[in-house]
Image (spheres, rainbow, N blue to C red):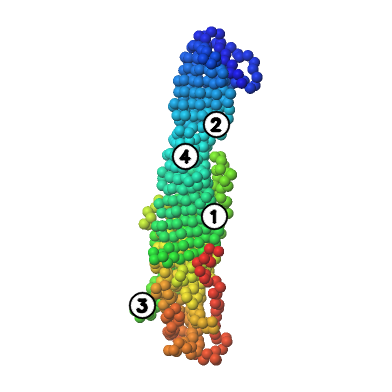
């Protein structure tokens, strides 16, 4: 290739321009548009160089070169420019420096000393830059900085793609933004869309609080939406979230976690796992689906595991949800005598908390696809704000007054599954001391604790009173005993069972050996635990009934006692029924073991359902 240098007229009349002669396509033609002086010099090797000085303006095709002075080396087709160098490429990219070496054959510019490349709102600063005008790619290797509005990025190495406006940063990459502070070793950043892509260990710190640790992902700094893979970790003041894939919307503060997702709350002492979790930071709610499991951790390492088809949690104001005090006076427990207290009648509160339909919480929102990570299409299909801002637990304001007299037992028909009227979820900015966290489980609820297991269709649990409220066909299993009823409240303390209350159609079945079932039924059943084990129970009804196999002092069975009365007290010893006491209107028969009528062995609605009992915590993850 031959570099053709054309001067218009005399050197000092450089304001004139003469069109160059026709040349082949392979030749690079540089026109001298302006220069105050021109001097030619023959070097020792016989080659001629030309030197232009004074407000120099050169042109090649649509690219303009400005500088204080320039030297053109004809034998190598190279140009060197000095002082206030400016390359204007089609009015779209402008590059500045104090020194330039331009290789015309390859159309490659080497710039140094206060280099600055400007395109639209983005400006690249460095001390050394290799700029390929043919491919519009610029490289630096000795440190550089990109300023895009209020966003500043620095790195040791970088490559700028002018056509796509992408910058590929390498080594000690640091992004500072009014909202974020990002540190990584490799990042692709688009100056037009402000989309950042990560392929290695990256720490994103929000100026509003919160950290993201990722190895793979894309983050849109314009609208705060991001997609991440490779077990990205999110941390805020109290919780840590991690999953195989995740999406985040800064504006709505909604997370979507997909694949082996985990939320760990160190302050409130719980862990939630699931293959899909939606979390709303605005109102501190989360919705977990696809085999979710909630783990309530105890201080002594004794944890409770809860599984359901869907798990939901939120915050409510304190005292808006109170436990139902359905026990009458005789159901209060005297720890000294292991019997009921004889004090006055306790008041019965109404059931304050009602459960919303589980279908209203279901969502099939897909995780944002990785190939959709464009600035104009970065859409995270999260659960709608309306569905997450409204909790699945609601309080009827007119239900806070007792609806039954002190002597009555709350009926299960007061538990409405579709009476959402007024929510009690509070905003995340509310004082944490005035709030209480609650959990809801919908469909196929299973609970496992070393001391006790339970199943039901739905569940409500509040950290204010540590009480599990089990609805629709609930069963509680404690050692060799099974307790059932229309509704069961299970009170816990230090993550261990302390008391249970059965509403309507209560039945306790104790299975001491394969051929015998101790049974007690009553309209209500109160049970008390000691050190996590069943210690005493009271059944009340009209009447309460029992089938009991009494034992002699040598522990041999003496027969089967079938009796009924107003009240039945059951005492446990070593996890088995030890004594049964009947109160008022007692009527019963003791049958010798060999003379038990088959139709008297079981009470009405007897059903031993050991197959429903969770045998170990691992079952809850299946």
Which of the pair 585/195 is nearer the observer? 195
Can the viewer see residue 587 in this picture?
no
Q: Which mark is residue 171?
A: 4
Residue 591 locus on image (x, y percent): 51, 90
Q: Residue at x 55, y 31 (%)?
A: 137
Alpha carbon of mark 4 to alpha carbon of mark 3: how far? 71 Å
Alpha carbon of mark 4 to alpha carbon of mark 1: how far? 31 Å
| 361 horizontally vs 567: left or right | right
Q: Looking at the image, do the residues carrying marks 2 and 4 touch, with CB atoms under 8 Å apart?
A: no
- Which residue is labeled 3 in the image? 334
Q: Looking at the image, do the residues carrying marks 4 and 3 touch, with CB atoms under 8 Å apart?
A: no
Residue 221 locus on image (x, y percent): 48, 40
Disc nearer the start of the sequence (2/3)? 2
Q: Looking at the image, do the residues carrying marks 2 and 3 touch, with CB atoms under 8 Å apart?
A: no
- Mark 2: give few (<14), some (14-19) or many (20+) Cα within 10 Å: some
Element marked by disc 4: strand
Q: Residue at x 51, y 32 (%)?
A: 139
Q: Is residue 22 above or below residue 287?
A: above
- Which residue is labeled 2 in the image? 137
């Amino acid at each position: 290739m031959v570099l053709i240098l054309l001067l218009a007229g005399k050197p000092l009349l450089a304001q004139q321009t003469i069109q160059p002669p026709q040349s082949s396509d392979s030749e690079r033609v540089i026109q001298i548009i302006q220069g105050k002086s021109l001097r030619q010099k023959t070097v020792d090797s016989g080659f001629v160089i030309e030197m232009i000085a004074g407000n120099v303006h050169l042109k090649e095709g649509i690219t303009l070169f400005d500088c204080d002075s320039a030297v053109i080396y004809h034998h190598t087709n190279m140009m060197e420019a000095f002082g206030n160098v400016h390359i204007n490429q089609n009015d779209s990219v402008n590059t500045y420096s104090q020194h330039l070496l331009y290789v015309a054959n390859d159309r490659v510019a080497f710039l140094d000393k206060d280099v600055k490349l400007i395109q639209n709102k983005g400006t690249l600063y460095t001390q050394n830059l290799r700029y390929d005008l043919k491919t519009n790619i610029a490289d630096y290797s000795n440190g550089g900085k990109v300023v895009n509005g209020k966003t500043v990025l620095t790195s040791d190495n970088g490559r700028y793609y002018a056509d796509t406006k992408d910058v590929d940063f390498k080594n000690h990459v640091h992004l500072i933004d009014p909202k974020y502070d990002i540190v990584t070793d490799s990042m692709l950043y688009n100056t037009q869309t402000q989309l950042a892509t990560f392929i290695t260990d990256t720490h994103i710190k929000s100026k509003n609080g919160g950290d993201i640790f990722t190895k793979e992902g894309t983050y849109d700094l314009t609208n705060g939406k991001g997609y991440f893979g490779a077990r990205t970790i999110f941390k805020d003041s109290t919780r840590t979230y991690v999953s195989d894939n995740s999406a985040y919307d800064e504006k709505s503060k909604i997370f979507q976690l997909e694949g082996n997702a985990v939320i760990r709350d160190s302050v409130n002492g719980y862990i939630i796992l699931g293959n899909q979790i939606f979390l709303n930071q605005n109102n501190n709610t989360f919705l977990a689906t696809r085999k979710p499991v909630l783990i309530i951790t105890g201080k002594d390492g004794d944890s409770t595991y809860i599984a359901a088809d869907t798990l939901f949690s939120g915050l409510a104001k304190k005292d808006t949800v109170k436990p139902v005090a359905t026990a009458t006076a005789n159901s209060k427990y005297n720890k000294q005598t292991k019997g009921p207290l004889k004090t006055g009648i306790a008041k019965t509160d109404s059931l304050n908390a009602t459960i919303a339909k589980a279908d209203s919480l279901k969502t099939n929102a897909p995780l944002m696809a990785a190939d959709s990570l464009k600035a104009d299409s970065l859409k995270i299909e999260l659960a709608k704000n309306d569905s997450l801002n409204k909790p699945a637990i609601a309080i009827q304001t007119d239900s806070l007054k007792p609806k039954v007299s002190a002597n009555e037992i709350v009926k299960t028909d007061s538990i409405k599954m579709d009476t959402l009227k007024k929510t009690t979820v509070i905003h995340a900015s509310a004082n944490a001391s005035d709030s209480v966290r609650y959990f809801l489980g919908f469909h196929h609820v299973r609970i496992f604790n070393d001391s006790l297991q339970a199943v039901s269709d739905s569940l409500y649990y509040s950290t204010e009173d540590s009480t599990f409220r089990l609805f629709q066909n609930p069963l509680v299993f404690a050692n060799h005993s099974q307790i059932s009823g229309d509704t069961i409240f299970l009170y816990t303390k230090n993550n261990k069972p302390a008391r249970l209350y059965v509403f309507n159609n209560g039945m306790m079945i104790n299975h001491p050996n394969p051929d015998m079932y101790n049974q007690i039924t009553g309209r209500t059943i109160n049970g008390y635990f000691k050190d996590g084990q069943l210690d005493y129970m009271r059944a009340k009804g009209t009447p309460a009934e029992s089938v009991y196999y009494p034992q002699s002092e040598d522990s041999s069975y003496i027969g089967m006692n079938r009796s009924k009365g107003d009240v039945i007290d059951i005492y446990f010893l070593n996890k088995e029924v030890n004594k049964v006491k009947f109160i008022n209107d007692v009527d019963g028969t003791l049958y010798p073991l060999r003379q038990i009528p088959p139709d008297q062995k079981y009470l009405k609605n007897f059903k031993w359902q050991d197959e429903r009992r969770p045998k170990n915590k691992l079952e809850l993850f299946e």
